[in-house]
Amino acid sequence: MRLSLAVAAVAAYARFALAQSTQFCDSGAGNLCFQSFTDPVHGISFRMVFPTSTTATEFIGEIEAPTGVAWAGLALGGGMLNNPLLMAWPNNGALVTTARIAAGYVQPTAYTGLTLTTIAGSSHVNSTGWKWTFRCQNCTSWSGGSFDPNGTPVMAWAYGATPVFTPADPNSNFAQHDDFGFWGMVTSAAHDANYQSFLNGGGGTTTAPPTSTTTTTSATSTPTLPPAQATPYDYIIVGAGAGGIVAADKLSQAGKKVLLIERGGPSTAETGGNNIPPWAKGTNDTRFDVPGLFESMFTGNTFWWCKDTNFFAGCLTGGGTSVNAALYWLPTDDDFSTGNGWPSGWQQAGQYASIINGRMPSTDTPSPDGKLYLQESYNVVQQILKPLGYSELTINSNRNFKDHVYGHSAYNFVNGKRAGPVATYLRTSKARSNFKFLQYVYVQSVVRNGATITGVQTNDTTVGPNGFIPLTKNGRVILSAGSFGTPRILFTSGIGPTDMIQVAQKNPTVGSLVPAQSSWINLPVGFNVQDNPSINLIFQHPTVDAYDNWDSAVIWDNPRPADAAQYLKSNTGPFAGASPRLNFWQALGGPDGKTRWMQGTVRPGAGSVTTKYPYDSSKIFTITVYLSYGITSRGRIGIDAAMKGQALVNPWFQDPVDKTVLLDGLNQIINSAKQVSNLTLVTPDKDTALTDYVNNYDPSAMCSNHWIGSAKIGTSNTTSVVDSNTKVWGTNNLFVVDASIWPSLPMGNPHAAIMASAELAVAKILALSGGP
Ligand SMILES: Cc1cc2nc3c(=O)[nH]c(=O)nc-3n(C[C@H](O)[C@H](O)[C@H](O)COP(=O)(O)OP(=O)(O)OC[C@H]3O[C@@H](n4cnc5c(N)ncnc54)[C@H](O)[C@@H]3O)c2cc1C
Ligand SMILES: *[C@@H]1O[C@H](CO)[C@@H](O)[C@H](O)[C@H]1NC(C)=O
Ligand SMILES: *[C@@H]1O[C@H](CO)[C@@H](O)[C@H](O)[C@H]1NC(C)=O
Ligand SMILES: *[C@@H]1O[C@H](CO)[C@@H](O)[C@H](O)[C@H]1NC(C)=O
Ligand SMILES: *[C@@H]1O[C@H](CO)[C@@H](O)[C@H](O)[C@H]1NC(C)=O
Ligand SMILES: *[C@@H]1O[C@H](CO)[C@@H](O)[C@H](O)[C@H]1NC(C)=O
Ligand SMILES: *[C@@H]1O[C@H](CO)[C@@H](O)[C@H](O)[C@H]1NC(C)=O
C-alpha cells in the first residue's frame, strides 16, 4: 500500500470546496442520526455519530458498501499517513475488521490505541452489500494527530477492488487502495441524545438490541509478512527478452514510469554477468558475450535455461536473445501481411525493419577485422545450391528476396560481441530515471478486479506488500514472458481455456492466486502455436574443419590456443562469430496449392551423428533444413500439474503436407549434393531412406526453439487472445508483447521480427486512449 498520493493530495483538495457530509438517520441502527458521506463512484457510505458532549472521544461509525467492494477504510484525518484507518471487508458472509496505522509508505500495521466494537445487530453481509456499524472508543486523538468532534474535519476514504491477501485474518496484508478521496465530515451536526441508550440496547428503537463482539486488533499481533514499500508504475513489463526489452525502452522513452521485471539474473558482463571461461579469466568475456561460445550453452552448469519447460528457453536478462545464435533476419513484408494472420494496421515491416537495423546493425562479417573464418562448409554448400538455381546475396540488404538465395549468416554482433536488445534498448532504458529493472523476481499472476488489472503478484515480498506491485491509476501490465512464460501467467490469472486454469488452480504454490471461476476469461491461450520443424543433414568433405564439433570441453575449457589468443587480443577470429556460416531460402509449392519456404542453416561440425559406417568427425558439417514461412501445422502448449510448460500437441507435421514439402526440399539438396566431388552424406546414411529418416525423427529434436502463437493476435475473441492493439480480450489494461502474439511464423529465425513487432505494438499501445 502506498499512501503518498493521499497525503500529497489533501492539501490541494482542501483549498477547493470539499464535499461535505449530510445527515442520515439509520432505521437499522436505532434511528441514530449520523453525518454521512457517500463516495459517488463506488457508492460506499462513511458515517459518524457522537454522544451529546462536544468533547466526546468516541463515536459510532458505519461503513456501508455494495457487493464488489473488496474492502473499504475510513481514515480519521485528511490523509492516510499517521492517521488511524478503520477497515472492513466481507469474508464468508461475516465481516472482518481492523484498525491500522501507517507511519511511512509501507503496509499499515495494526493500531492498538483505540477500542473497536462491532455492533452486530446493525452490521451484516448479504447478497447485495455489506454494512459495518461499530463503536470506536479513544478515537478522536492519537499519537501525532486528532480531529475535532465539533467542527468539520477532513476525513479520507479508501477503496480496494482486490481482496486482502488472507481475508479470514484481521491482520492480513493488502494491496494498495485502488481509489481514495476526501470529504468534510460535519461532526458538529453529528451529536445524538440517543447515543448511549442505543448502546444500552434501548433508546426507543424498534430494532433488535445490539449485541457486540470485539475485534482482534491485539497488541501482540503483527502482520504476517514484513512490510514493504510498493511503488506504483504506469507500465509493468514482465520478462526482459526480445519483446519486453523493446517495450520497456519505448515506453520509458515516452516518459512513462516503467518497471521491467525479469525472473533470471545477469547475462552479459554489461548486465553484471561473470560466467567467464577459464581461458578468458580477468576479462569481461562471458559465455553470453563471446559469440563463439554459443554452442557451449547446451552442456555444463546450465543456470541460464528456464527449468520449467521441456524446451530450451532463456531465463536470464535478454531471454532468448542472450543464449541464441543471434542469427539476425530483418522481417519481410510477408511476415507482417494479413495473409500471415496480422490484422490490418500491422503492415509496416519495412519501416520497423529500418528502425531495428538502425539500432542494431546487421553484419555478415562478425569478426571486426572484416575477415571471414571457417568458410569451408560455405564453399562446399554453395556448390550444392548453385546448380539448383540459387544466387548469392548479402541477405539483409534485400530482406524480401527469399527464394533461391543464399549468403553469409547475418548477426547483430557488435565489435565481436553479442549485442542484441541488451546492449541497445536495455542500455538506453537504464539511463532513464523513470525506468526500473528488477532481476530474480518471478511474476506469478496479474491481480485483477474483473477486467481491470491492479498490479502483479510476485514471489518477492521485498518488492511490495506480500509481493504485490501496483499500477498507477490507468496503469497497464504488459506480458513479455515468452511463448511458454506468458501463457503460464495468464492461466494463473484466470485467463485461458478452462482446463488450463483448473490445472493452475490445483497447484499448491499458485492455486490460491487464481480468481473465482465467475471471473475467468475464456480465451484460446496456448492454441495456434507454431515452431519450425527442422531436420539435420550431416555431410563430410575433406576440406571441412569441423572445429571439434564445438565440443564444450574444447571451446569452454581448452580452445585452440591461437584462436583464443586472437579473440583475447582483438575480439576477432572464429570466436567472433557463432557457429552458423551460411543461410539459404527457397520457396516450395505443395500439393495443396500453397507455397511454403525452406530455410537452411549451415555450420561446421555436428551435435550427433547416426550411421553404422565409418566417418571422420573432424571433417563433418551440418545443414539444418527448416520449413518456415507458409507452414500450416499448429500445435497446442499448456502446463502440467507442476506448472511446467509442455507441448500438449506437438506443432510439427500436424498437417502432412508440411512433411511432404520439407521432404521435397531435403531431396533436392541431397540430390544436388551428389554432384559435388568428395562430398558424402553421413546422416542419413546410405541404408536409411530419407522418408524413414524423417518419419522416425525424434520430435523434440525437430524443435527449432522458435515458438510463436500462444497468445495470438487477431480480430475475434474466439480465435485470438489479443486484439489488434495487443490488448488481451476481455480486459481493460492487460497486453502481450512477445513471440506469443505472432499469428504465424516469420520467414527467418524470429528475434528481429519479434523486436520489430514490439516496436509496432508499443506505438499502438501509446496511441490507445485511457492509458497512464
Ligand atoms: C537455443 C535457442 C537458439 C535460438 N536461436 C535464434 C537465432 O539464432 N536467431 C533468432 O532470431 N532467434 C533465435 N532463437 C529464438 C529467439 O531467441 C526467441 O524467439 C526470442 O527470444 C523470443 O522472444 P520473447 O520476447 O518472446 O521471449 P524471451 O526472449 O524468451 O524472453 C522472455 C523473458 O521473460 C522472462 N520470464 C518468463 N517468465 C517470467 C515470469 N513469470 N516472471 C518474470 N520473468 C519471466 C524470461 O526469463 C525471459 O527473460 C533461439 C532460441 C533458443 C532458445
Ligand atoms: C443488504 O445490504 C445492503 C447494504 O447494507 C442494504 O442496502 C440492503 O438493504 C440489504 N438487503 C436486505 C434484503 O437486507
Ligand atoms: C488512548 O489513546 C492514547 C493515544 O492517543 C493511548 O496512549 C492510550 O493508551 C489509549 N487508551 C486506551 C484505553 O486505549
Ligand atoms: C569490465 O567491465 C567493467 C564494467 O563495465 C569495467 O569497469 C572493467 O574495466 C571491465 N574489465 C575489463 C578487463 O575490461
Ligand atoms: C523468485 O523467483 C526467482 C526465479 O525463480 C528466484 O531467483 C528468486 O530467488 C525468487 N525470490 C524469492 C524471494 O524467493
Ligand atoms: C577429392 O579427394 C581426392 C582425394 O582426397 C583429391 O585428390 C581431390 O583433389 C579431391 N577433389 C576435389 C574436387 O576436392
Ligand atoms: C467476446 O465477444 C462477445 C461479443 O462481443 C462478448 O459477449 C464476450 O464477452 C467476449 N469475450 C471475451 C473473453 O472478451
Image (cartoon, rainbow, N blue to C red):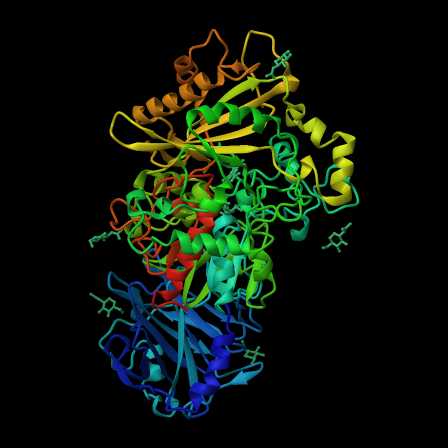
In the rendered image, the vertical position of residue 317 relative to residue 297, given as above or below = below
In the rendered image, the vertical position of residue 411 relative to residue 6, given as above or below = above
Q: Determine the residue positioned at 65% across, 45% down.
A: 417
**Could one spot residue 4 in this view of the protein?**
yes
Identify which residue, 351 or 521, lies in the foreground. 351
In the rendered image, the vertical position of residue 590 relative to residue 81, given as above or below = above
x, y percentage for residue 283?
76, 46
Answer with left or right where residue 244 lies relative to residue 379: left
In the rendered image, the vertical position of residue 461 relative to residue 117, given as above or below = above
Quadrant of the image for the C terminus?
A: bottom left
Identify which residue, 745 or 523, lies in the foreground. 745
**Could one spot residue 245 in this view of the protein?**
no
The total number of labels drawn is: 0
Q: Determine the residue positioned at 70% across, 27% down.
A: 553
| Image-quadrant location for residue 131 | bottom left
x, y percentage for residue 197?
33, 82
| Image-quadrant location for residue 398 | top left
Answer with left or right where residue 136 lies relative to residue 421: left
Q: Determine the residue positioned at 66% across, 39% down.
A: 371
